[in-house]
Image (cartoon, rainbow, N blue to C red):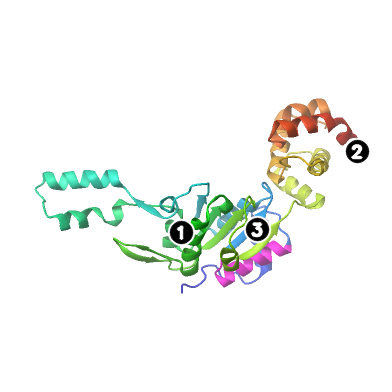
Amino acid sequence: MSPPAFPLESPEAVWRLLEGERYVAEEGLATAIFLALRLGRPLLLEGEPGVGKTEVARVLAQGLGVPLFRLQCYEGLELEQALYEWDHARQLLEVRLLEALGERDRERLHRSIYREEFLLKRPVLQALEVGRAVLLIDEVDRTDEAFEAFLLEVLSEFQVSVPELGTIRAPFRPAVVLTSNRTRELHDALRRRCVYYWIDYPSLEKELRIVHLRLPELPARLAEGLVRLVQAVRGLGLLKPPGVAEALDLGSALVAAGAGDLDPRVLEPFLGALLKTREDVERVRERLPSLLAAL
């Protein structure tokens, strides 16, 4: 089996790497990342939308100085979109060109069009070929069990077989990050292959630190009021509670508008940056005066 590509020496080293990329992580997450890298296993991150699961892969790649390959999962995702497919249009043109030049031997025609130059490499194969890379398999819960079985096979051996070309093995194990919003339960076999970590909504102190790091231009008083408001809104039982990403979007909107204070008149036009359904917007709009008064 291929060796780990990223021999970071401790969870503290991982924590410093994340901090250097302005990602605020707790000790548990840094330890999970360290274990995944050291053991050469995928890291499975679950949590509510917008809590920073996808961002882990991005900052990890940036901090390690390696490429990031992202596979965005969706219902009906086929293996070809994850792994590879042949460029049939170019292959057909190649056959026509060779035939025009007088080539008639079917075996030679077959060999000429099944070469690597005609292979369209998708994220999983790209990451395996590079080895020292981060492979993000985002929202894996949107796929089906057949796709999970494919992932389990690839992530067990870190190699794939292309019948026309042979077996492609990773020179090093890429860092693999799987994210899930738990729209369905993942199979136990895939979970056992991974190092698992749940990313929860942040505490007030942690979220305030995130806002300060990501939006230093937002005045401290506004930042604290924004975070307290978002934390209160999450307790209203909304259809889609706002995550950290939405809190940052609202903060960016306030900065762009040059807002000097938080009041219903200022915030109402920007609720669409924080909330993503009509029902949630209407509910928060009705409660906005009392929410702000309680800050």
Query: How far is the residue under mark 2 from the one under mark 3?
Result: 34 Å
Tell me where residue 179 sits by quadrant. bottom right
Query: How far is the residue under mark 2 from the one under mark 1?
Result: 49 Å
- In reply to whether residue 259 is colored magenta, the answer given is no
Q: Tag on residue 127?
A: 1
Visible in this render: residue 62? yes
Look at the image and give the residue range highlighted in magenta: 27-41
Q: Is residue 261 left or right of residue 177?
A: right
Q: Is residue 236 above or below residue 70?
A: above
Q: Nearer the viewer, residue 32 or 287?
A: 287
**Residue picked out by circle 3:** 18
Q: Secondary structure at mark 3?
A: helix
Give yes or no for contact between labels 1 and 3 (Cβ–Cβ under 8 Å). no
Q: Is residue 85 left or right of residue 151?
A: left
Sequence-first tag of 2 and 1: 1
Q: Secondary structure at mark 1?
A: helix
Q: In the rendering, at what x and y percent does residue 173 appear?
A: 49, 67
